[in-house]
Image (tube, helix red, strand yellow):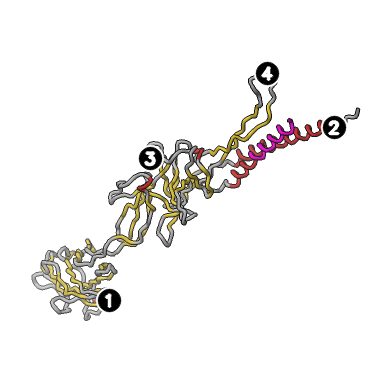
Amino acid sequence: MSFYTSLSGLQAAQTEMSTISHNLANVATNGFKKSRTDFADVIASSVTSDPTKVVGSGTVVKGNRQLFTEGNLKATGSSLDIAISGDGFFTVKTNGINASTAYTRNGSFSVDPASHYVVDAQGSALQVYPVDAEGNVTATGQDGLINLTLPETSGTPTATAKVALDVNLSANATAPGTAFDRTNAASYNNSTATTIYDASGNAMTLTNYYVRNDAASPAGANSWSVYSYVGNQQLAVGGSTNPVTVTFNAAGTMTAPTAPISYDAFTSSSGTSAQSLTFDLTGTTQAPSAFSVQARSQDGKSVGQLAGVTVDESGIVSANFSNGDTKPLGKVALANFANPSGLRQMGNSYWSASGISGEATLGSANDNGFGSLMSGTVEGSNVDITEELVALIAAQRNFQANAKALDTAGQISETIFNIRS
Protein backbone atom coordinates (compact mmCIF):
# COMPACT_ATOMS: atom_id res chain seq x y z
CA MET A 1 0.00 0.00 0.00
CA SER A 2 2.87 2.42 0.77
CA PHE A 3 4.00 2.10 -2.88
CA TYR A 4 0.71 3.53 -4.13
CA THR A 5 0.62 6.18 -1.41
CA SER A 6 4.08 7.45 -2.40
CA LEU A 7 3.19 7.15 -6.08
CA SER A 8 0.14 9.40 -5.60
CA GLY A 9 2.41 11.96 -3.94
CA LEU A 10 4.85 11.77 -6.87
CA GLN A 11 2.07 12.26 -9.40
CA ALA A 12 0.61 15.17 -7.44
CA ALA A 13 4.00 16.89 -7.13
CA GLN A 14 4.64 16.34 -10.84
CA THR A 15 1.28 17.93 -11.70
CA GLU A 16 2.08 20.92 -9.52
CA MET A 17 5.49 21.36 -11.16
CA SER A 18 3.84 21.21 -14.59
CA THR A 19 1.36 23.89 -13.54
CA ILE A 20 4.13 26.12 -12.20
CA SER A 21 6.18 25.58 -15.36
CA HIS A 22 3.17 26.62 -17.47
CA ASN A 23 2.81 29.76 -15.38
CA LEU A 24 6.48 30.65 -15.77
CA ALA A 25 6.38 30.01 -19.51
CA ASN A 26 3.61 32.63 -19.85
CA VAL A 27 5.11 35.32 -17.64
CA ALA A 28 5.25 37.65 -20.70
CA THR A 29 1.89 36.65 -22.24
CA ASN A 30 -0.57 39.54 -22.25
CA GLY A 31 -3.82 38.74 -20.47
CA PHE A 32 -2.55 35.39 -19.11
CA LYS A 33 -3.96 34.18 -15.79
CA LYS A 34 -1.92 31.81 -13.65
CA SER A 35 -3.23 28.56 -12.19
CA ARG A 36 -2.80 26.86 -8.82
CA THR A 37 -2.93 23.12 -8.20
CA ASP A 38 -5.22 22.10 -5.34
CA PHE A 39 -4.88 18.71 -3.57
CA ALA A 40 -6.98 16.57 -1.25
CA ASP A 41 -6.05 13.64 0.95
CA VAL A 42 -7.39 10.13 0.24
CA ILE A 43 -8.86 8.17 3.16
CA ALA A 44 -10.26 4.64 2.81
CA SER A 45 -12.56 3.90 5.75
CA SER A 46 -16.03 2.63 6.55
CA VAL A 47 -18.52 2.84 9.40
CA THR A 48 -16.95 -0.28 10.92
CA SER A 49 -13.41 1.12 10.88
CA ASP A 50 -11.80 2.30 14.07
CA PRO A 51 -11.21 6.02 13.40
CA THR A 52 -8.06 5.91 15.53
CA LYS A 53 -6.49 3.26 13.28
CA VAL A 54 -7.34 4.62 9.82
CA VAL A 55 -4.26 5.27 7.65
CA GLY A 56 -4.49 7.59 4.66
CA SER A 57 -3.96 6.32 1.13
CA GLY A 58 -2.17 9.29 -0.40
CA THR A 59 -3.28 12.41 -2.23
CA VAL A 60 -5.25 13.35 -5.30
CA VAL A 61 -5.30 16.43 -7.51
CA LYS A 62 -8.66 18.10 -7.04
CA GLY A 63 -8.08 20.55 -9.85
CA ASN A 64 -6.06 23.38 -11.34
CA ARG A 65 -7.74 26.56 -10.20
CA GLN A 66 -7.33 29.65 -12.38
CA LEU A 67 -6.58 32.84 -10.47
CA PHE A 68 -8.09 35.92 -12.11
CA THR A 69 -6.20 38.56 -10.18
CA GLU A 70 -5.32 41.63 -12.23
CA GLY A 71 -1.99 41.59 -14.08
CA ASN A 72 0.46 44.45 -14.44
CA LEU A 73 -0.80 47.31 -16.64
CA LYS A 74 1.63 48.44 -19.31
CA ALA A 75 1.34 51.75 -21.18
CA THR A 76 1.73 51.41 -24.95
CA GLY A 77 0.46 54.70 -26.39
CA SER A 78 -1.75 52.93 -28.96
CA SER A 79 -5.40 53.95 -28.61
CA LEU A 80 -6.55 50.45 -29.64
CA ASP A 81 -4.64 48.85 -26.79
CA ILE A 82 -7.28 48.59 -24.06
CA ALA A 83 -6.98 47.25 -20.52
CA ILE A 84 -9.78 46.40 -18.09
CA SER A 85 -9.16 47.82 -14.64
CA GLY A 86 -11.37 45.59 -12.53
CA ASP A 87 -13.67 42.70 -13.42
CA GLY A 88 -14.75 41.65 -16.87
CA PHE A 89 -13.60 40.15 -20.16
CA PHE A 90 -13.51 41.43 -23.72
CA THR A 91 -15.89 39.61 -26.04
CA VAL A 92 -14.45 38.58 -29.43
CA LYS A 93 -15.80 36.65 -32.40
CA THR A 94 -13.32 34.13 -33.73
CA ASN A 95 -12.83 33.92 -37.48
CA GLY A 96 -13.13 30.90 -39.75
CA ILE A 97 -15.93 28.53 -40.67
CA ASN A 98 -16.66 27.53 -37.08
CA ALA A 99 -16.75 31.08 -35.72
CA SER A 100 -17.64 31.25 -32.05
CA THR A 101 -17.67 33.71 -29.16
CA ALA A 102 -14.62 33.80 -26.91
CA TYR A 103 -13.61 35.91 -23.93
CA THR A 104 -10.19 37.40 -23.22
CA ARG A 105 -8.34 39.84 -20.99
CA ASN A 106 -5.76 40.55 -23.71
CA GLY A 107 -6.78 43.96 -25.03
CA SER A 108 -4.07 44.39 -27.67
CA PHE A 109 -6.08 45.20 -30.80
CA SER A 110 -5.29 46.47 -34.29
CA VAL A 111 -7.12 47.07 -37.58
CA ASP A 112 -7.47 44.33 -40.18
CA PRO A 113 -6.45 45.95 -43.52
CA ALA A 114 -8.92 43.88 -45.56
CA SER A 115 -12.11 43.97 -43.50
CA HIS A 116 -11.33 47.09 -41.41
CA TYR A 117 -12.46 45.16 -38.32
CA VAL A 118 -10.70 45.83 -35.03
CA VAL A 119 -9.07 42.48 -34.29
CA ASP A 120 -6.64 40.84 -31.91
CA ALA A 121 -3.47 38.95 -32.84
CA GLN A 122 -5.52 35.86 -33.82
CA GLY A 123 -7.77 37.88 -36.14
CA SER A 124 -10.82 37.66 -33.87
CA ALA A 125 -13.09 40.72 -34.08
CA LEU A 126 -13.78 42.84 -30.99
CA GLN A 127 -17.50 42.90 -30.17
CA VAL A 128 -19.30 46.16 -29.37
CA TYR A 129 -22.84 47.43 -28.92
CA PRO A 130 -24.15 49.61 -31.79
CA VAL A 131 -24.66 53.30 -30.95
CA ASP A 132 -26.41 56.28 -32.51
CA ALA A 133 -24.83 59.58 -33.52
CA GLU A 134 -24.85 60.77 -29.88
CA GLY A 135 -23.20 57.60 -28.58
CA ASN A 136 -26.33 56.07 -27.05
CA VAL A 137 -26.50 52.26 -27.17
CA THR A 138 -29.25 51.10 -29.53
CA ALA A 139 -29.12 47.30 -28.93
CA THR A 140 -28.02 45.06 -26.07
CA GLY A 141 -27.61 41.38 -25.31
CA GLN A 142 -25.71 38.66 -27.16
CA ASP A 143 -27.75 39.15 -30.34
CA GLY A 144 -27.09 42.89 -30.32
CA LEU A 145 -23.29 42.60 -30.57
CA ILE A 146 -21.54 43.67 -33.77
CA ASN A 147 -17.95 43.66 -35.03
CA LEU A 148 -16.18 46.96 -34.37
CA THR A 149 -15.42 48.39 -37.82
CA LEU A 150 -13.36 51.48 -38.63
CA PRO A 151 -14.68 53.32 -41.72
CA GLU A 152 -12.10 54.77 -44.09
CA THR A 153 -14.07 57.92 -44.89
CA SER A 154 -16.83 60.13 -43.51
CA GLY A 155 -19.18 62.71 -44.94
CA THR A 156 -20.47 63.74 -48.37
CA PRO A 157 -18.42 66.14 -50.51
CA THR A 158 -19.86 69.61 -51.07
CA ALA A 159 -18.62 72.08 -53.66
CA THR A 160 -17.58 75.47 -52.32
CA ALA A 161 -20.13 78.13 -53.27
CA LYS A 162 -19.24 80.94 -50.86
CA VAL A 163 -15.91 82.27 -49.64
CA ALA A 164 -15.65 85.07 -47.08
CA LEU A 165 -12.30 86.72 -46.45
CA ASP A 166 -11.72 89.73 -44.23
CA VAL A 167 -8.26 91.25 -44.52
CA ASN A 168 -6.56 94.44 -43.51
CA LEU A 169 -4.78 96.18 -46.38
CA SER A 170 -2.01 98.43 -45.18
CA ALA A 171 -2.67 102.11 -45.75
CA ASN A 172 1.10 102.64 -45.90
CA ALA A 173 1.52 100.35 -48.92
CA THR A 174 2.72 101.87 -52.19
CA ALA A 175 1.73 100.96 -55.73
CA PRO A 176 4.11 98.38 -57.24
CA GLY A 177 4.73 100.49 -60.35
CA THR A 178 4.78 97.49 -62.72
CA ALA A 179 2.11 95.54 -64.58
CA PHE A 180 0.56 92.69 -62.61
CA ASP A 181 2.15 89.29 -63.17
CA ARG A 182 1.31 86.57 -60.64
CA THR A 183 4.73 84.98 -61.21
CA ASN A 184 6.44 88.26 -60.23
CA ALA A 185 6.06 89.01 -56.51
CA ALA A 186 7.18 92.59 -57.12
CA SER A 187 4.03 93.27 -59.18
CA TYR A 188 1.58 92.92 -56.27
CA ASN A 189 1.57 93.90 -52.62
CA ASN A 190 0.01 90.90 -50.88
CA SER A 191 -1.66 87.56 -51.57
CA THR A 192 -3.86 85.03 -49.75
CA ALA A 193 -4.46 81.31 -50.41
CA THR A 194 -7.75 79.70 -49.42
CA THR A 195 -8.54 75.99 -49.77
CA ILE A 196 -11.84 75.33 -51.52
CA TYR A 197 -13.46 72.13 -52.89
CA ASP A 198 -15.10 70.94 -56.09
CA ALA A 199 -18.22 68.74 -56.28
CA SER A 200 -16.11 65.60 -55.81
CA GLY A 201 -14.48 66.91 -52.64
CA ASN A 202 -11.14 67.56 -54.34
CA ALA A 203 -9.19 70.37 -52.74
CA MET A 204 -8.29 73.43 -54.83
CA THR A 205 -6.54 76.67 -53.96
CA LEU A 206 -8.19 80.04 -54.42
CA THR A 207 -5.41 82.62 -54.59
CA ASN A 208 -6.18 86.33 -54.34
CA TYR A 209 -3.61 89.00 -55.23
CA TYR A 210 -3.94 92.53 -53.86
CA VAL A 211 -2.41 95.40 -55.83
CA ARG A 212 -2.34 98.98 -54.49
CA ASN A 213 -3.42 101.41 -57.19
CA ASP A 214 -1.94 104.86 -57.78
CA ALA A 215 -1.91 107.60 -55.14
CA ALA A 216 -5.06 108.61 -53.30
CA SER A 217 -7.46 111.17 -54.71
CA PRO A 218 -7.64 114.66 -53.17
CA ALA A 219 -10.50 113.52 -50.99
CA GLY A 220 -8.24 110.88 -49.47
CA ALA A 221 -9.95 107.92 -51.12
CA ASN A 222 -7.87 105.19 -52.69
CA SER A 223 -8.35 101.80 -54.28
CA TRP A 224 -6.90 98.32 -54.70
CA SER A 225 -7.18 95.77 -57.51
CA VAL A 226 -7.95 92.17 -56.58
CA TYR A 227 -7.05 89.35 -58.98
CA SER A 228 -8.47 85.87 -58.27
CA TYR A 229 -7.23 82.49 -59.50
CA VAL A 230 -8.29 78.90 -58.86
CA GLY A 231 -5.19 76.91 -59.61
CA ASN A 232 -3.88 78.46 -62.83
CA GLN A 233 -7.32 79.60 -63.99
CA GLN A 234 -8.20 83.26 -63.56
CA LEU A 235 -11.76 83.91 -62.43
CA ALA A 236 -13.92 86.31 -64.41
CA VAL A 237 -16.84 88.57 -63.57
CA GLY A 238 -19.41 89.15 -66.33
CA GLY A 239 -17.09 87.58 -68.88
CA SER A 240 -14.24 89.95 -68.07
CA THR A 241 -10.99 88.97 -66.39
CA ASN A 242 -10.32 92.52 -65.29
CA PRO A 243 -9.55 92.70 -61.57
CA VAL A 244 -12.17 93.62 -59.01
CA THR A 245 -11.65 97.16 -57.72
CA VAL A 246 -11.92 97.68 -53.96
CA THR A 247 -12.16 101.29 -52.79
CA PHE A 248 -11.76 102.91 -49.37
CA ASN A 249 -12.57 106.35 -48.02
CA ALA A 250 -10.14 108.46 -46.07
CA ALA A 251 -11.14 106.72 -42.82
CA GLY A 252 -10.15 103.31 -44.23
CA THR A 253 -13.70 102.05 -44.59
CA MET A 254 -14.45 100.05 -47.72
CA THR A 255 -16.93 101.80 -49.98
CA ALA A 256 -17.04 99.28 -52.83
CA PRO A 257 -17.98 96.59 -53.50
CA THR A 258 -20.92 96.63 -51.10
CA ALA A 259 -21.98 93.02 -51.79
CA PRO A 260 -20.21 89.70 -52.38
CA ILE A 261 -18.55 89.32 -55.79
CA SER A 262 -20.17 86.70 -58.02
CA TYR A 263 -17.62 85.05 -60.29
CA ASP A 264 -18.61 83.38 -63.55
CA ALA A 265 -19.03 79.60 -63.37
CA PHE A 266 -15.75 77.75 -63.90
CA THR A 267 -14.60 74.16 -64.20
CA SER A 268 -11.47 73.27 -62.29
CA SER A 269 -8.79 70.96 -63.60
CA SER A 270 -9.91 68.27 -61.14
CA GLY A 271 -13.66 68.82 -61.56
CA THR A 272 -16.14 67.43 -64.06
CA SER A 273 -18.82 70.13 -63.82
CA ALA A 274 -18.93 73.91 -63.69
CA GLN A 275 -19.26 75.52 -60.28
CA SER A 276 -20.23 79.02 -59.24
CA LEU A 277 -18.43 80.97 -56.55
CA THR A 278 -19.12 84.16 -54.60
CA PHE A 279 -16.35 86.04 -52.84
CA ASP A 280 -17.26 88.26 -49.87
CA LEU A 281 -14.75 90.99 -49.07
CA THR A 282 -17.18 93.31 -47.29
CA GLY A 283 -15.37 92.99 -43.96
CA THR A 284 -12.06 94.19 -45.39
CA THR A 285 -10.42 97.28 -43.87
CA GLN A 286 -7.53 99.61 -44.65
CA ALA A 287 -5.44 100.71 -41.70
CA PRO A 288 -1.81 101.80 -41.22
CA SER A 289 -0.95 98.44 -39.65
CA ALA A 290 0.59 95.60 -41.66
CA PHE A 291 -1.39 93.35 -43.96
CA SER A 292 -3.24 90.60 -42.07
CA VAL A 293 -6.03 88.08 -42.48
CA GLN A 294 -8.71 88.77 -39.89
CA ALA A 295 -11.28 86.10 -40.80
CA ARG A 296 -11.64 83.38 -43.41
CA SER A 297 -14.42 80.89 -44.16
CA GLN A 298 -15.77 78.74 -46.99
CA ASP A 299 -18.76 76.40 -47.18
CA GLY A 300 -17.24 73.50 -49.13
CA LYS A 301 -16.48 70.11 -47.65
CA SER A 302 -14.30 67.19 -48.62
CA VAL A 303 -14.68 63.52 -47.78
CA GLY A 304 -12.94 62.99 -44.46
CA GLN A 305 -10.20 60.37 -44.22
CA LEU A 306 -9.79 58.40 -41.01
CA ALA A 307 -7.31 60.31 -38.86
CA GLY A 308 -7.52 58.66 -35.44
CA VAL A 309 -9.46 56.55 -32.96
CA THR A 310 -10.24 57.16 -29.30
CA VAL A 311 -11.73 54.95 -26.58
CA ASP A 312 -13.07 56.59 -23.43
CA GLU A 313 -13.44 55.06 -19.95
CA SER A 314 -17.02 54.01 -20.61
CA GLY A 315 -16.00 52.11 -23.75
CA ILE A 316 -17.33 54.45 -26.45
CA VAL A 317 -15.10 54.08 -29.53
CA SER A 318 -15.00 57.22 -31.69
CA ALA A 319 -13.32 57.84 -35.05
CA ASN A 320 -11.87 61.22 -36.01
CA PHE A 321 -11.64 62.26 -39.65
CA SER A 322 -9.55 64.78 -41.56
CA ASN A 323 -12.59 66.93 -42.40
CA GLY A 324 -13.32 67.48 -38.70
CA ASP A 325 -16.03 64.83 -38.35
CA THR A 326 -16.15 62.76 -35.16
CA LYS A 327 -18.25 59.62 -35.34
CA PRO A 328 -19.06 57.19 -32.48
CA LEU A 329 -18.68 53.63 -33.75
CA GLY A 330 -19.80 51.47 -30.83
CA LYS A 331 -19.48 50.73 -27.14
CA VAL A 332 -17.12 47.97 -26.03
CA ALA A 333 -19.06 45.01 -24.64
CA LEU A 334 -17.71 43.36 -21.48
CA ALA A 335 -18.63 39.95 -20.10
CA ASN A 336 -18.51 38.54 -16.58
CA PHE A 337 -19.30 35.18 -15.00
CA ALA A 338 -20.66 33.89 -11.73
CA ASN A 339 -17.61 31.63 -11.36
CA PRO A 340 -14.72 32.77 -13.59
CA SER A 341 -12.51 29.97 -12.24
CA GLY A 342 -14.78 27.53 -14.09
CA LEU A 343 -14.07 29.01 -17.53
CA ARG A 344 -12.68 26.58 -20.10
CA GLN A 345 -9.22 27.55 -21.34
CA MET A 346 -8.92 27.62 -25.14
CA GLY A 347 -5.37 28.90 -25.56
CA ASN A 348 -4.27 32.26 -26.99
CA SER A 349 -5.53 33.87 -23.74
CA TYR A 350 -9.08 32.83 -24.70
CA TRP A 351 -11.75 31.35 -22.46
CA SER A 352 -15.20 29.99 -23.20
CA ALA A 353 -18.19 29.52 -20.93
CA SER A 354 -18.82 26.17 -19.30
CA GLY A 355 -21.42 24.66 -17.02
CA ILE A 356 -19.17 25.44 -14.05
CA SER A 357 -18.60 29.09 -14.94
CA GLY A 358 -22.20 29.77 -15.91
CA GLU A 359 -23.38 31.81 -18.88
CA ALA A 360 -21.83 35.18 -19.64
CA THR A 361 -23.44 38.28 -18.20
CA LEU A 362 -22.92 41.13 -20.68
CA GLY A 363 -22.54 44.77 -19.77
CA SER A 364 -20.40 47.86 -20.25
CA ALA A 365 -17.47 49.47 -18.51
CA ASN A 366 -18.30 51.12 -15.17
CA ASP A 367 -21.58 49.20 -14.88
CA ASN A 368 -22.23 47.32 -11.66
CA GLY A 369 -19.89 44.29 -11.63
CA PHE A 370 -17.63 45.57 -14.42
CA GLY A 371 -14.37 47.51 -14.34
CA SER A 372 -13.35 50.61 -16.25
CA LEU A 373 -11.38 50.74 -19.49
CA MET A 374 -7.95 52.27 -19.99
CA SER A 375 -6.99 53.16 -23.56
CA GLY A 376 -3.32 53.06 -24.53
CA THR A 377 -2.66 50.28 -21.98
CA VAL A 378 -2.53 46.48 -22.04
CA GLU A 379 -2.78 44.04 -19.17
CA GLY A 380 0.20 41.75 -18.79
CA SER A 381 0.41 38.35 -17.13
CA ASN A 382 -0.44 38.09 -13.43
CA VAL A 383 2.43 35.63 -12.84
CA ASP A 384 4.90 36.67 -10.11
CA ILE A 385 8.25 35.05 -10.95
CA THR A 386 9.55 35.08 -7.38
CA GLU A 387 6.40 33.49 -6.01
CA GLU A 388 6.40 30.81 -8.69
CA LEU A 389 10.08 29.94 -8.16
CA VAL A 390 9.50 29.51 -4.43
CA ALA A 391 6.50 27.28 -5.17
CA LEU A 392 8.60 25.31 -7.67
CA ILE A 393 11.27 24.64 -5.02
CA ALA A 394 8.60 23.45 -2.60
CA ALA A 395 7.06 21.16 -5.25
CA GLN A 396 10.49 19.76 -6.05
CA ARG A 397 11.11 18.98 -2.38
CA ASN A 398 7.71 17.27 -2.17
CA PHE A 399 8.62 15.19 -5.19
CA GLN A 400 11.99 14.23 -3.66
CA ALA A 401 10.37 13.33 -0.32
CA ASN A 402 7.81 11.05 -2.00
CA ALA A 403 10.55 9.49 -4.12
CA LYS A 404 12.54 8.80 -0.95
CA ALA A 405 9.48 7.23 0.71
CA LEU A 406 8.99 5.05 -2.37
CA ASP A 407 12.64 4.02 -2.29
CA THR A 408 12.39 3.20 1.43
CA ALA A 409 9.29 1.06 0.84
CA GLY A 410 11.21 -0.79 -1.85
CA GLN A 411 14.12 -1.45 0.47
CA ILE A 412 11.77 -2.79 3.16
CA SER A 413 10.10 -5.09 0.65
CA GLU A 414 13.48 -6.31 -0.57
CA THR A 415 14.55 -7.07 3.02
CA ILE A 416 11.40 -9.13 3.57
CA PHE A 417 11.92 -11.05 0.34
CA ASN A 418 15.49 -11.90 1.36
CA ILE A 419 14.55 -13.44 4.73
CA ARG A 420 15.76 -17.03 4.94
CA SER A 421 14.33 -19.57 7.24
Residue at coordinates 57% horizontally, 46% vertically from top-left? 27
Of labels 3 and 1, the one closer to you: 3
> Which residues are the magenta region?
1-16
Residue 174 in view = no
Q: Secondary structure at mark 2?
A: helix
Category of crowding for the residue at label 3, using alpha-carbon neighbours closer than 10 angstroms: few (below 14), some (14–19), many (at least 20): some
- The quadrant holding residue 247 is bottom left
**Coordinates of residue 53 in the picture (x, y in percent):** 70, 20
Of labels 2 and 1, the one closer to you: 2
Residue at coordinates 53% horizontally, 38% vertically from top-left? 67
* Circle 4/circle 2 CB separation < 8 Å: no
Q: Which mark is residue 380?
A: none
- Amino acid type, mark 3: Asn
- The quadrant holding residue 181 is bottom left
**As drawn, 350 above or below 405:** below
Residue under pointer 2: 417
Q: Which mark is residue 366?
A: 3
- Amino acid type, mark 4: Asp
State the CA–CA distance, disc 2 to disc 3. 71 Å
Residue under pointer 1: 269
State the CA–CA distance, disc 2 to disc 1. 106 Å
**Coordinates of residue 195 in the picture (x, y in percent):** 27, 67
Image quarter of the N terminus: top right
Earlier-in-chain disc, 3 versus 1: 1
